[in-house]
Image (cartoon, rainbow, N blue to C red):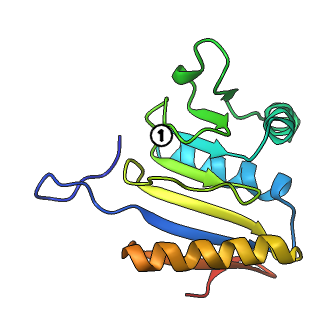
Amino acid sequence: MSVAAQDGARAPCEVWFYHLERTSLDQALPELLEKTLARGWRAVVRATGRDRIEHLDGWLWAYRDDSFLPHAPADEPGAARQPILITANDDNPNAADALFLVDGAEPGDVSAYTRCVVLFDGGDEAALSTARRQWSVFRKTGLPVSYWKQQGRGWEKQA
């Protein structure tokens, strides 16, 4: 379950922005989801539409020959039991610790999460604009925000 502060109050959600430059979302997302599950966390992947949900559903079953990520679209029966849910809604039916935002999906209330991860394509001006706006909103709310950029050897924290 989520980490709470010593006094029993929930620690504020950390917001991490991942600036995709060298790989696509299809390459980066499974790796980040694997790390999330390795921590013992659950995840919600929030997309902006049905086409992306269907694509990610298929992709997460087949992205690597020797592995798969247990997941389901949130509208399937029993989906809340899955460690990873893919949805366009702003609820948290599987009590996830991590929220992944793709394609400019809006975060809504992130207070139920330990971490919110915003993934955006650095080659897409609209995606950059959305990420900048979201960064500004998160900063104004006082949540801890960090920015990660792809470098030659992986992710490097920039801010």
Location of residue 41 in the rendering, given as x and y in whole percent from the top left corner = 47, 43
Residue drawn 44% across and 53% down?
109
Q: Amino acid at mark 1?
A: Ala
Location of residue 28 in the rendering, given as x and y in whole percent from the top left corner = 77, 58
Residue drawn 24% across and 53% down?
4
Q: Give the vertical position of 52 relative to 25 (above or below).
A: above
Q: Nearer the viewer, residue 55 or 88?
A: 88
Location of residue 115 in the rendering, given as x and y in whole percent from the top left corner = 47, 58
Q: Which residue in the rendered view is the most extreme toward the left?
A: 7
Instruction: Say which quadrant the N terminus sits in.
Output: top left
Residue drawn 61% across and 38% down?
89
Q: Is residue 54 visible?
A: yes
Q: Is residue 21 visible?
A: no
Location of residue 72 in the rendering, given as x and y in whole percent from the top left corner = 68, 26
Categorize mark 1 by other alpha carbons within 10 Å: few (<14), some (14-19), many (20+): many
Q: Give the vertical position of 157 relative to 14 (above or below).
A: below
Quick check: 124 left or right of 114?
A: right
